Structure formats: structure tokens, C-alpha cells
Image (tube, rainbow, N blue to C red):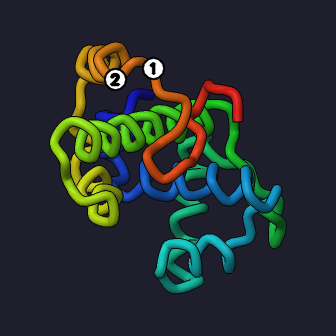
């Protein structure tokens, strides 16, 4: 499944997957409660999203257990995060957009880039290892 297909099936999926990746990276495990707090949604909304992601084989979770990204979910999360971080670089370094606003704008744009444009941005920006805020880009050393 690619990002476009996923967004058609479940528009919020890229946000949930990328946030689950970040929670796993920072805390090691993802509870529905932590995911809800992280995303600013209700616990039932987070639980429902995790169930939808499980049905798409993107997330694994035992009943009443912690959720974790399945391999396809992790791959999609990394695609979303890389796009987001590259957009932040473009906005801040190239366009001079305010650093404190770049995250919000990148969030709006991240799901609309083609693979070719992402590769071009990565090359153009010199293959950065971290976003302007210091978070490591997926696939680079931390």
C-alpha cells in the first residue's frame, strides 16, 4: 500500500503512523492513551484509529495491550516523516519561513509530494541528517 492509497482509505492514517513512530522512538511503546494525548484527540478516537490501522495490517496490538507498528506501517511512517522534515528544511533554509511555523506548514503539505519531488528535495538540500528542529531524519544516524 502506498501513501496515496492509504490516505484514500483512512485520511488520518499518515498522522497516526508518524506519531506512533515518534512515540515508539522516544518511549519504546505506544499506549492508546499516550497516542491520544500526543495527537490531541480523545482516547476512544485513538483506539478507533489503532483498530482501523490493525485492520489494514499496519499496526499490531494484543487485546488491551500496547500498539506497535508492523513493518508496512513503519515504512509508511518513515515516508511521512522524511517528507515532513525535508519540507521543514525547504521552508526554513530556502524560503526563509519562520522556524516556529515550519512544522505546521510541513504538516499541511507532507502528504501531497510525489516520490520524485521528495528525492529531488533530498538531493537539493544535501541529504540533511536532521530536521531544522534537530530531529533525526529517518534512515540517518541519530
- Res 41 label: none
Q: Position of residue 136 (x, y in %)?
A: 59, 40
Residue 86: tell me if it is visible.
yes
Quadrant location of the N terminus in the rendered image: top left
Mark 1 Cα shell of 10 Å, populated few (<14), some (14-19), many (≥20): some
Q: Position of residue 55 (x, y in %)?
A: 57, 49
Residue receiving disc 1: 127
Q: Residue at horizontal 19%, vertical 53%?
A: 97
Quadrant location of the C terminus in the rendered image: top right
Q: Nearer the viewer, residue 25 or 45?
A: 25
Q: Residue at horizontal 19%, vertical 47%?
A: 96
Q: In the picture shown, does residue 79 fall above or below 85?
A: above
Q: CA distance from mark 2 to mark 1?
A: 6 Å
Q: Nearer the viewer, residue 130 or 31?
A: 130
Among the 4 quarters of the image, the one containing residue 95: top left
Q: Nearer the viewer, residue 108 or 137?
A: 137
SS state under label 2: loop
Among the 4 quarters of the image, the one containing residue 138: top right
Residue receiving disc 2: 125
SS state under label 1: loop
Left or right: where does residue 31 sit relative to residue 55?
right
Mark 2 Cα shell of 10 Å, populated few (<14), some (14-19), many (≥20): some
Residue 8: tell me if it is visible.
no
Q: Residue at horizontal 34%, vertical 47%?
A: 9
Q: In the picture shown, does residue 20 fall above or below 96?
A: below
Q: Position of residue 2 (x, y in %)?
A: 40, 28
Pointer 2 with pointer 1, Cβ within 8 A: yes
Left or right: where does residue 68 sit relative to residue 129?
right
Q: In the picture shown, does residue 141 fall above or below 120?
A: below
Amino acid at each position: 500500500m502506498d501513501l496515496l492509497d492509504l490516505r484514500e482509505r483512512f485520511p488520518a492514517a499518515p498522522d497516526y503512523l508518524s506519531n506512533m513512530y515518534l512515540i515508539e522512538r522516544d518511549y519504546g511503546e505506544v499506549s492508546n492513551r499516550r497516542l491520544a494525548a500526543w495527537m490531541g484527540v480523545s482516547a476512544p478516537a485513538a483506539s478507533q484509529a489503532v483498530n482501523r490501522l490493525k485492520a489494514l495490517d499496519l499496526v499490531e496490538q494484543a487485546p488491551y495491550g500496547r500498539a506497535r507498528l508492523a513493518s508496512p506501517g513503519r515504512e509508511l511512517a518513515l515516508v511521512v516523516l522524511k517528507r515532513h522534515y525535508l519540507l521543514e528544511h525547504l521552508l526554513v533554509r530556502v524560503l526563509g519561513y519562520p522556524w516556529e511555523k515550519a512544522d505546521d506548514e510541513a504538516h499541511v503539505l507532507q502528504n501531497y509530494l510525489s516520490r520524485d519531488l521528495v528525492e529531488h528535495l533530498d538531493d537539493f538540500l544535501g541529504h540533511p541528517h536532521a530536521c531544522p528542529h534537530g530531529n533525526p531524519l529517518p534512515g540517518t544516524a541519530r
